Amino acid sequence: MLRKADNSASWAVAASLVLFSIGGILTTVVPPLVDSSWAKPFENSDPAKGPTGKLTQLNELQLQGRAIYVREGCWYCHTQQTRTLLADTKRSGWKGVDSPVSTPDEFVYDSPHLFGTKRTGPDLSRVGGKYDEQWHRTHFRNPRDLVQGSIMPPYPWLVENPQEFKAIVAYMQSLGRAKNWRPNEDYEQ
Amino acid sequence: MQEQLSRAEVAGASAPSGAIVHEDLSAKWFLVSAVSYFFIVGIVALVIAAKFVWPDLMGTIAPLSYGRLRPLHVNGMLFGWLLAADMGLTFYLIPRLCGVKLWSEKLGLATAGLWNVIILSAVVCLLMGWNQGLEYAELPLALDILVVVAWLMYGGNLFMTISQRKYPAMYVSIWYVMGTIVWTAFVYLTGNFAVLFTTGVNQANLNWMYVHNAVGLIFTPVGLALAYYFIPRSSNTPLYSHKLSMIGFWSLAFVYVWTGAHHMLHGPISQWLQTISIAFSVMLLIPVWAAVYNFFATMRGQWHQLRENVPLKFLMSGVVFYLLTCFQGPMHSLRAVNAIVSKTDWIPGHAHMAVLGAFSFFAIAGTYAALPKMFGKPLHSDSLANWSYWSFMMGGLGFFVTLWLGGFWQGWQWNNWAIPFIDTVVALKPVWLVRFFSGILMFLGIVLFSYNVLATALGAREQKA
């Protein structure tokens, strides 16, 4: 086949497409068919099996906040995944409680996905419920007022737009809360 | 073999009988636009590097905030500069390798026009924050469709040229260009259209398949096509082995597409898929070493040419960067290494060595080598070209090395959770400062390169008038 392809453009194209599609199909089409957890929303009521809770779809305000998160490119610097690394569960943890690792069933409704590739700022997969609205207001206006040495850009245009500010905060408070892992530690308590 | 000349080389005189005269119009337009975007987007690159050091710089203007400029930098460099330059150079080399004129210069010019419309609209969209939220696939759907149309025009033109070729045996560069055209179509459709019908981890898996193969099956094969053409051309030495280049091509075709999931190692995606992606990432060493050995063996006994030959300097440095970046890739796919460097500043260090150090170096070399032929006159200044090489080289090395070291350092700090996150940010500030100064050097390289290209191009036009 390869010798034939050496002198024939159509053979070369056909052969390179066949080789490409083996890996292409096995790694993109097959996995979601094999692994049902990719499409099944998280739900657990048995504490023996780990954190309890249920993944719900975002409401309209939270979705609006998510769109702002996408628009402003927050996802270029903040990941949303607590990986299977001890350090990640400690860093996503809160007040001495380690965070559970992120699982595919927590992201079933996400589009676009916001897992991210770069952590210039901290991971946000479990940030929901940690900081109240006043904290976020100050932080978005100028991050360095609250966190000395931070290099996050200021976002005055979000704070000055009440609707957008409410939306982005509502979205951030929703992050990572399908799993109920720190029942008495949130600011609302 | 027939003599091949460009229209400018013939310059009004009647061509020697039997010679093939290439118009090179499409190639010229693509190259000149690509070089202009290289310069403009280079400014954006400097601004975002500066924002790491001075985070309040232009901080209160929404369209100029980091989150808007970063995708402009990435898309502008990938599609405005590198892919456009690659398209221009393949419009130059494919007709020459086939011994026929480009099938349609009109279609090629229309493709160049459409490509410019796409890039200029992309600038507006990204500054306005009209971002689809998927890496490398940020552009709105309407522009994605235009990209597909432009790609069909480009691919159709080259395939028609190849089908009319005079030489039955196909040189390896033709293979890589055909591979690029076909794979890009599928990879692009997956990354920009198929993703829209999925959510969550499934979507992320498709997205990473696209992101990885945008580099692996678009910029790698077309970059290698340039290297396989211009290394023997510039050194005036035949390629070491056609057979070895075939091994490289077919292993690339088979191995690359499996590796997308290595972007989510330790993340919320099935462990077995992570393991597959690691295994195939390590196998990438086969196509890479096959190509690199071929290039080094071609240069055996010819290394002294590097002293004088600027395109060859860029080409062989690009080969070394290609070898290094493709050694990093498999190594940081290993779980133990990934646990340290993933998500750190190592990653931009690695990405820049691939896209700038390897593939942009090939494209710059190709531009320097093809320009005198296309415009029928010597390059505006060989000495400026040499200076541009050293600016790119010093800036690039400064950038790559500090980010690798900084990335490892950052990863080790993250893995010690006794260190608060903000302290790991503050610790990296010297790294980002060095990155900014390296960026200035790289930008100086861009300025010298684009000035030289435009001076050669415009000078050529004056001569005619």
Image: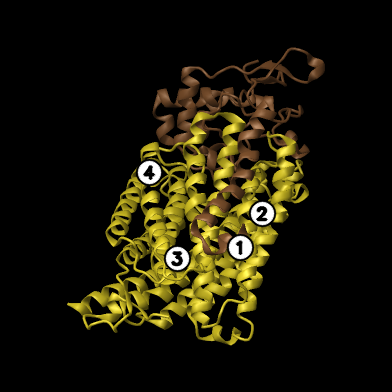
Can residue B386 be seen in the rendering of this structure? yes
Are the numbered discs 2 and 4 placed on the same chain, yes or no? yes
The numbered mark, 4 or 3, whose residue comes first in the sequence reads 4
Task: Residue B423 in the image: state x and y as whole percent.
Answer: 67, 46
Do pointers 4 and 3 mark residues of a single chain? Answer: yes
Going from the N terminus, do you reach mark 2 or mark 3 first? 2
How far is disc 4 from disc 3 in space, using C-alphas? Answer: 22 Å
Numbered circle sitting on residue B407: 2
Q: Mark 2 to mark 3: distance in Å? A: 23 Å
Residue A3, numbered circle:
1
Q: Which disc, if any, is residue B127?
A: 4
Q: Amino acid at mark 2?
A: Gly
Q: Which residue is outermost to the right?
A: A48
- Chain where mark 4 sits: B
- Vertical comparison of B420 with B395: above or below: above
- Same chain, labels 2 and 3: yes
Q: Residue B443: which disc?
A: 3
Helix, strand or loop status at disc 1: helix
- Taking depth in this image into account, of B187 and B436 the one nearest to the observer is B187
Residue displayed at 47% across by 66% down: B363
Colour assigned to chain B in the rendering is yellow
